[in-house]
Image (cartoon, rainbow, N blue to C red):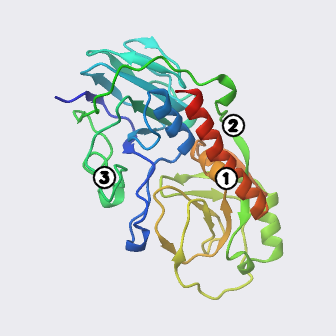
Amino acid sequence: MPSIRVLKAGLCTTIQDLGRVGYQAFGIPVSGVMDTFSACVANFLVGNAKEQALLEMTYTGDSLEFLKPMQIAITGANLSPKLSGVAISNWESYGVEAGDILEFGRLVDGARAYLAFSGGVQVPLVQGSRATYVRAKIGGFLGRALQKGDELFIAPSPPQKKRLLPQKHRPLYAKETSLPALLGPEVHYFSLQSVRRFFHSAYIISPRADRMGICLEGAVLERRLQTELVSNPLVLGSVQVPNNGQPIVLMADRQTLGGYPKIATLLKESVIALAQMLPGQKVHFIPLKLEQAQERYKGFYENLAHLQEVLK
């Protein structure tokens, strides 16, 4: 028997986990959640391991009917959730019973919300992951976003206690923010003036923003070298600059190879912050040294491990 029924679909709600690792050599993107922090904490709040599949909701949420009792938690963007007509909060867990209905309303802040269920969403593994990659129609629920009438299965789980993430650990979502970044592998393709411009200018998030990449609008970045690049591997947070001189930040569903020069690479925390921003909002970039970036990367996962202990 199914555990949840979709009564009304949001703009783009997909099943995600931490991604399809180890298949980029075959042209298969990693995919997975856009905001690793929010997704992991959502799972911790309902007693799951961080790798469990959950729902990622972009800009709007779904209306869901629960057909079985379970524990749920919402993190990330505030989409004004209500459980059977009563307002509930992000960053804490709630018990639900059969017949309860979860609805979402106005977007207050952030861009992507994560909804975890005790036991995790059960869909077939594809190359070791339940993450949805819509462009190839693989993973998740039939390789697509959720639609009205879809029914989800949640793995059985023992009763869970009430959990709440302390306020000091909850992220704030700003309309303008600074994003730490490393110099990219093809920074020598750009004039020194362009590199300085990239790190000293404000860029506006374009409406051309999705799970594959986020286009930015602002100061034009001019190349010093015009030679063509052989396509080479891309990583999460790569900042490509196409011929129009406007940067594109590559996100979870990025292609595995690309031929545009990369002026910078965003840190993990920067990718997460960008994933929670809306078109029209503003970003600045802060240059970091490799050693600083490595320390912050290590610190990110140490903090997650700490929060997992806090929420046990």
Where's residue 62, x and y in %?
37, 30
* Label pair 1/3, CB-CB below 8 angstroms: no
Given the image, on which type of amino acid does mark 1 rest?
A: Tyr
Q: Inspect the image, locate mark 3, and give the three-letter code of the amino acid beneath it.
A: Gly
Tell which circle, 3 or 2, labels the residue nearer the N-terminal end.
3
Residue at the image position 37 percent from the left and 43 percent from the top: 14
Q: Is residue 48 above or below residue 51?
A: above
Return the residue at label 1: 297
At a point 55% along the width and 21% down the height, the residue shown is: 164
Q: Quadrant of the N terminus?
A: top left
Q: For the residue marked with disc 2, what is the amino acid?
A: Ala
Whether residue 131 sits left or right of residue 257 in the image: it is left
Report helix, strand or loop for mark 1: helix
In depth, the one of 120 and 264 nearer the eye is: 120
- Whole-number angstrom distance, CA of label 3 to CA of label 2: 32 Å
Residue position marked by numbered label 2 in the rendering: 174
The answer for how far apart the CA atoms under marks 1 and 3 are is 28 Å
> Label 3's element?
loop
CA neighbours of label 2 inside 10 A, class few (<14), some (14 to 19), many (20+): some
Q: Nearer the viewer, mark 2 or mark 1?
A: 1
Residue linked to disc 3? 139
Residue 18 locus on image (x, y percent): 45, 49
State which tag comes first along the sequence, 1 or 3: 3
Q: Is residue 60 visible?
A: no
Residue displayed at 77% across by 61% down: 291
154 vs 221, nearest the viewer: 154
Image-based side of 162 in relation to 171, left or right: left
Q: Quadrant of residue 224?
A: bottom right
C-alpha span from label 2 to label 1: 22 Å
Q: Mark 2 falls on what kind of element?
A: loop
